[in-house]
Amino acid sequence: MNNREKKIIVGNWKMNPPTIMEARRIFGGAKRAASKIRRAEVVICPPFIFLSALAQSAKNSRNISLGVQNIFWETAGSYTGEISPTMVLSTGAKFTIIGHSERRILGETDNQVAKKAVLALKLGLRTIICIGENSRDEKGEYLNFLKNQIKNSLQGVSGKLLENLIIAYEPVWAIGGKEAMRPGQVEEMGIFIRKILADIYEQEAAMKLSILYGGSVDAKNAEAIVYQGNVQGLLIGRQSLEPESFKAILEVM
Ligand code: PGA
């Protein structure tokens, strides 16, 4: 994997902003910023309810796509309150995040993450599976935790489905915090994760997968995380809701 390939910059809006008007404004900023850059593709993941409106605005614009923050593991049926990947695709959105730590805290299991990933990948959604340890310990138990989480979250994802798979490494302790992980550590973790992926799949396939970093990324640390940390992109929470900061992040890619 070399540094010259296009980076993937994903904005995860979470349960923000409060109104469709605000959503349009923030998305407009991202769209303008994305149209001016060459070295990254931009993905915005708003709440489902804003997806259709923003899809209109995303049509015909270059370098920006839409994604969602979660999907269900069936295409249709009696599942009150759930949204299927087929529905997501029908809006023109191309990506889905799955297994974000904020969903795992609410009870989402590795098994559910895997079921969602298998269906999303089969249907052709570009699928960003989030993984990451909750905390660190001196004995390095967190590495075992991560290994199990990766293996279990990819259960049933066969080598044939890897084309649209993206891994987002988000150490939970760095999400919504003050400081991101240092680039050197990001690089180490990227190597560790790729090694686990090479255990599950072929070495060559594992080398081709994109790994993103997420957790307190901002305009000051983004460049070093990507280029020294040697990751293929970023998953950005808070700063993706601030058009000026998001633009500044895109400009250093
Ligand atoms: P943050 O969130 O950038 O606000 O830390 C990242 C994420 O949860 O994806």
Image: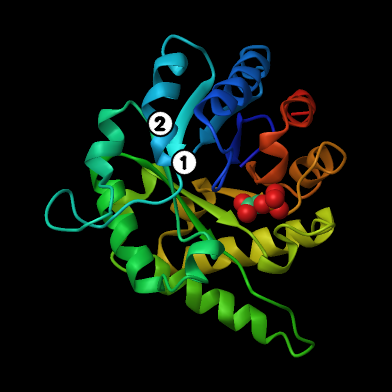
Name the residue beneath numbered marker 2. 51
Q: Residue at x 19, y 58 (%)?
A: 79
Callout 1, which amino acid? Pro
Distance, label 2 to label 1, CA atoms, is: 7 Å
Callout 2, which amino acid? Leu
Residue 16 got which mark? none
Q: Nearer the viewer, residue 2 or 164?
A: 164
The furthest residue to the top: 60
Q: Quadrant of residue 30?
A: top right
Q: Residue at x 47, y 26 (%)?
A: 65
The furthest residue to the bottom: 139
Residue 111, x across and y down, in percent? 34, 72
Residue 29, above or below 127: above
Assess mark 1: CB under 8 A from ligand 1?
no
- Mark 1 lies on a secondary structure that is loop
Q: Residue at x 55, y 63 (%)?
A: 102
Say left or right for 67 vs 251: left
- Mark 2 lies on a secondary structure that is helix
Is any part of residue 158 visible from this angle?
A: no
Q: Quadrant of residue 246?
A: top right
Q: Nearer the viewer, residue 33 or 143?
A: 33
Residue 47 got which mark? 1
Residue 105, above or below 50: below
Residue 100, x across and y down, in percent? 52, 59
